[in-house]
Image (cartoon, grey):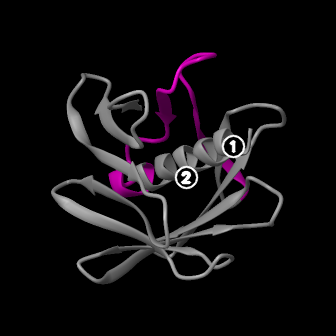
Amino acid sequence: MLTAEPEGWWRRRYRLFDEEGRDLGVVELNWGWGKAGQITVEARLLEIERHRWTGPWVVSADGDRIATVTKLRVFSRSFEIDFDGENYLMQPRLLSSIFDVFVEGRAVGTLRSAGLFSRRIVVDLPDDMPLALRAIATWVVIMVRKRANAAS
């Protein structure tokens, strides 16, 4: 299990920690055209870009595409992550800030807020899932939250 903690109240930058409190990396959300964010884990910089309003986000490392994140419908908060040839579905629970993660229709974990008014995110996904994938899923939750806050 991981925890994503914001580095400041107004910042869009979160640090990832494991259960022992070890710093595993950074997840950062950007606003603006093109570059949507970046993730630093396992001494790798992952850049997240979106080239059109409705297209997928592309996650690349050293110029190579490692994942895509696709929003399934315009007015939904469901996303599909294609990572290393495997599809992961992120679906929010009804009237909740909890996201369930599915692989081939089977629930494998959740991402949720640490508390009612907390900005911390608890990433409860299997330890054998690549850290980069867990960080990408965390970026999706941060993006959804920021968009919801901007709309309210």
- Dot 2: what SS? helix
Q: Is residue 100 above or below residue 69?
A: above
Quarter of the image with the C terminus is top right
Circle on res. 140? 2
Quarter of the image with the N terminus is top left
Given residues 31 and 5, the one toward you in this image is: 31
Q: Spatial distance from mark 1 to mark 2, Cα to Cα?
A: 12 Å
- Residue at position x 65%, y 39% from top? 149
Callout 1 amino acid: Ala
- Residue at position x 32%, y 56% from top? 39
- Residue at position x 49%, y 72% from top? 33
Q: Is residue 38 magenta-colored? A: no
- Residue at position x 38%, y 31% from top? 6
Q: Is residue 107 magenta-colored? A: yes
Q: Is residue 63 above or below residue 28?
A: below
- Residue 71 position by quadrant: bottom right
Q: Is residue 64 above or below residue 28?
A: below
Given residues 114 and 131, the one toward you in this image is: 114
Q: Residues within 10 Å of mark 2 (few under 14, many from 20)?
A: many
Q: Residues within 10 Å of mark 1 (few under 14, many from 20)?
A: few
Circle on res. 148? 1
Q: Is residue 118 left or right of residue 3?
A: right
Q: Which residues are magenta?
A: 105-134
Q: Which numbered disc, 1 or 2, marks the residue closer to the eye? A: 1
Given residues 20 and 92, the one toward you in this image is: 92
Callout 2 amino acid: Val
Looking at the image, the residue that sits furthest to the left is: 43
Residue 24 point in image, percent of width and height: 24, 41
